[in-house]
């Protein structure tokens, strides 16, 4: 890289990120307005400081718009699924059924906000857990802002080995560590060990949000059991099957939570009446009153949840049945781009098929089929009246527009920064200043990449090779640094603007992204810093 790494170029590269954080966290500017401003600053910096020409900027912008489209189809279909279920008033049935099966309110929240969203992350990813889980929690009576925070925390641990391990595979491919089985295994162990701690921390955070010390006391055992199954199970599975390392423990956690619900400490009705997480005014029939039940449709719990059953079955069938996945995955759409360079010689290689989109094996396709299933099933039984499907479709389009602007702005900004060398300067500058102390920031670099791109996979593509090279040059443990990189990406999944926008959109609180970010940011940053300090003590101070 020929881009000069100076304090000035480093600060200019950091400026768009700082601007976003200040606007969204400090001044509560909606993502729809903050994203274009961040993009504008990155464009000015790219031209004035990093010597990017118009051709490079156009191509990188098209790449960003294409990547945003792939995300936005998930947004649209996830909202459509929610609106179809909501049109049939099925969420009220679902809430009452879950309360009867599991009368402990905190355990109900953990079932959706930890177990179910983790399961979705294990098979789909792409923000689907946040987009789908948020309205389900709202249906339980959770305040929309807190519902988003819970889903962000609940699914984040699965961002390395979830989506059938695409982020892990990206790290292995970028660094070539598959050629050294010992390093590969040790990297997996470091990654899963850190993520196990992260899994436990986020569970504790959810309990604390619900009821502070009282919630923590009640939920600690459940969190510990689920963390053992999910985090510990992932450690064990990663050693011999990385593809299913997240998915299998997530499946087992359903059985674990079923057992927990029948234990004495969770089988009796329990809730904290003044919990900040709950919106008691909108609970409707949550208390089971006969007056509230009169307006409910005559459907069972399983009928109410049937579109989500359909989503699970379709996804598993397509992704886990090899011949089906291979057949449907043949149809791919990708864009070709020529090689581009900045005035400093920072080069983006030519790409024959950039980020190929396989629509028939994409999460959006599964969500669309599930939404259509819900519409026809509910309509057939009279639970969606004439014109209800059209109304749901119109609400979906209205809700998607703000997120489209925000997501596109964020992703195009990340492409501009990556394609002009700004992202590389950020990482290189940190390494040059800190020397071996760089290891303290290795998880923060992964978190930064995840925050910028809303993807752990993209973070690993951006930074894993840099982290590998830096670790080699500084004489640091490569496996620990790479493990911290991808674990940092999982930590950063809680604060990704793209994921937050998905939540605020399906939760009906668009424009509140800064409020959500302010609540989850301290947890994520504290965890990443804690991991970095631990690695620094182990490998630098004590010289392990």
Image (cartoon, rainbow, N blue to C red):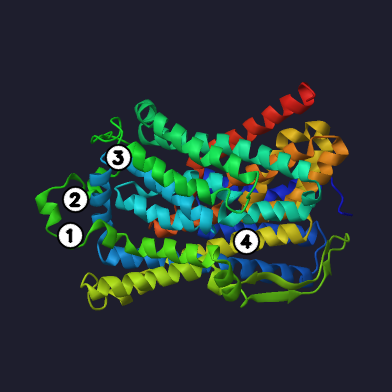
Tell me whether the residue at label 1 lies in contact with that at label 2, contact meaning CB atoms closer than 8 angstroms.
Answer: yes
The residue nearer to you, when weighing 53 against 63, is 63
Which part of the image, by quadrant, shows the C terminus? Answer: top right
Which of the two discs, 4 and 3, labels the residue nearer the N terminus?
3
Kindly identify the residue that appears in the image at 73 percent across and 37 percent down.
480
Picture coordinates of residue 321, whole percent (x, y): 54, 66
Label 4, on which residue? 411
Q: In the picture provided, is 424 more to the left or to the right than 34?
A: right
Marked residue nearer the N-terminal end (2 or 4): 2
Q: Quadrant of residue 237?
A: top right
> Which is nearer the eye, 142 or 105?
105
Q: What residue did someone put label 3 on? A: 105
| Label 1 crowd (10 A; few <14 / some 14-19 / many >=20) | some
User: According to the image, label 2 marks what residue?
Assistant: 285
Image height check: is 127 above or below 472?
A: below
Disc 2, disc 3: CB below 8 Å?
no
> Which residue is at the front of the view, 365 or 179?
179
In space, the residues marked 2 and 4 are separated at their CA atoms by 41 Å
The answer to which image quadrant residue 196 occupies is top right
Q: Does 60 sit left or right of 161 as displayed?
A: right
Residue position marked by numbered label 1 in the rendering: 296
Q: Secondary structure at mark 4?
A: helix
Q: Residues within 10 Å of mark 2 (few under 14, many from 20)?
A: some
Q: Earlier in the sequence, mark 1 or mark 4?
A: 1
Expressed as whole percent of the image width and height from the top left, the position of residue 200 reads 51, 35
SS assignment at label 3:
helix
């Amino acid at each position: 890289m020929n881009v000069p790494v100076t304090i000035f170029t480093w600060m200019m590269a950091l400026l768009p990120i700082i601007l976003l954080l200040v606007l969204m966290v400090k001044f509560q500017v909606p993502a729809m307005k903050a994203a274009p401003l961040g993009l504008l600053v990155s464009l000015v910096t790219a031209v004035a400081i990093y010597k990017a020409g118009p051709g490079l900027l156009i191509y990188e912008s098209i790449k960003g718009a294409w990547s945003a489209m792939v995300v936005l189809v998930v947004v649209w279909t996830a909202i459509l699924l929610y609106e179809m279920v909501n049109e049939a008033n099925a969420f009220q049935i679902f809430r009452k059924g879950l309360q009867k099966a599991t009368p402990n309110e905190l355990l109900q929240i953990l079932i959706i906000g930890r177990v179910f969203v983790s399961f979705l992350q294990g098979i789909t990813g792409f923000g689907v857990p946040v987009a789908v889980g948020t309205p389900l929690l709202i249906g339980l009576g959770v305040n929309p802002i807190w519902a988003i925070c819970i889903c962000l925390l609940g699914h984040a641990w699965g961002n390395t080995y979830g989506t059938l391990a695409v982020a892990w595979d990206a790290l292995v491919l970028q660094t070539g560590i598959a050629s050294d089985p010992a390093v590969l295994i040790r990297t997996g162990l470091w990654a899963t060990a850190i993520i196990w701690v992260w899994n436990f921390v986020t569970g504790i955070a959810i309990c604390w949000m619900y009821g502070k010390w009282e919630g923590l006391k009640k939920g600690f055992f459940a969190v510990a059991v689920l963390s053992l199954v999910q985090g510990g199970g992932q450690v064990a599975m990663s050693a011999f099957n990385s593809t299913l390392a997240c998915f299998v423990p997530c499946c087992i956690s359903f059985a674990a939570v079923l057992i927990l619900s029948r234990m004495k400490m969770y089988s009796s009705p329990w809730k904290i009446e003044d919990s900040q997480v709950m919106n008691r005014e909108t609970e409707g029939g949550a208390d089971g009153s006969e007056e509230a039940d009169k307006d409910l449709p005559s459907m069972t719990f399983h009928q109410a949840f049937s579109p989500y059953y359909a989503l699970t079955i379709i996804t598993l069938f397509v992704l886990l049945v090899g011949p089906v996945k291979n057949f449907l995955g043949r149809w791919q759409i990708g864009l070709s781009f020529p090689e581009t360079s900045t005035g400093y010689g920072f080069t983006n290689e030519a790409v024959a098929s950039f980020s190929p989109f396989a629509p028939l094996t994409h999460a959006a396709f599964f969500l669309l089929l599930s939404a259509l299933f819900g519409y026809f099933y509910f309509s057939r039984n009279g639970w969606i009246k004439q014109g209800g499907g059209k109304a749901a479709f119109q609400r979906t389009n209205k809700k998607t527009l703000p997120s489209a602007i925000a997501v596109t702005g964020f992703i195009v900004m990340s492409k501009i920064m990556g394609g002009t060398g700004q992202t590389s300067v950020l990482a290189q500058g940190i390494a040059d200043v800190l020397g071996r102390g760089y290891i303290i920031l290795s998880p923060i670099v992964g978190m930064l990449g995840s925050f910028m791109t809303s993807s752990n996979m993209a973070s690993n593509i951006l930074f894993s090779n840099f982290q590998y090279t830096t670790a080699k040059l500084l004489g640091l443990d490569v496996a620990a640094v790479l493990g911290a990189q991808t674990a940092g990406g999982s930590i950063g999944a809680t604060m990704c603007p793209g994921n937050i926008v998905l939540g605020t959109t399906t939760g009906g609180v668009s424009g509140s992204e800064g409020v959500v970010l302010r609540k989850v940011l301290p947890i994520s940053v504290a965890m990443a810093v804690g991991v970095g300090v631990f690695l620094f003590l182990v490998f630098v101070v004590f010289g392990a």
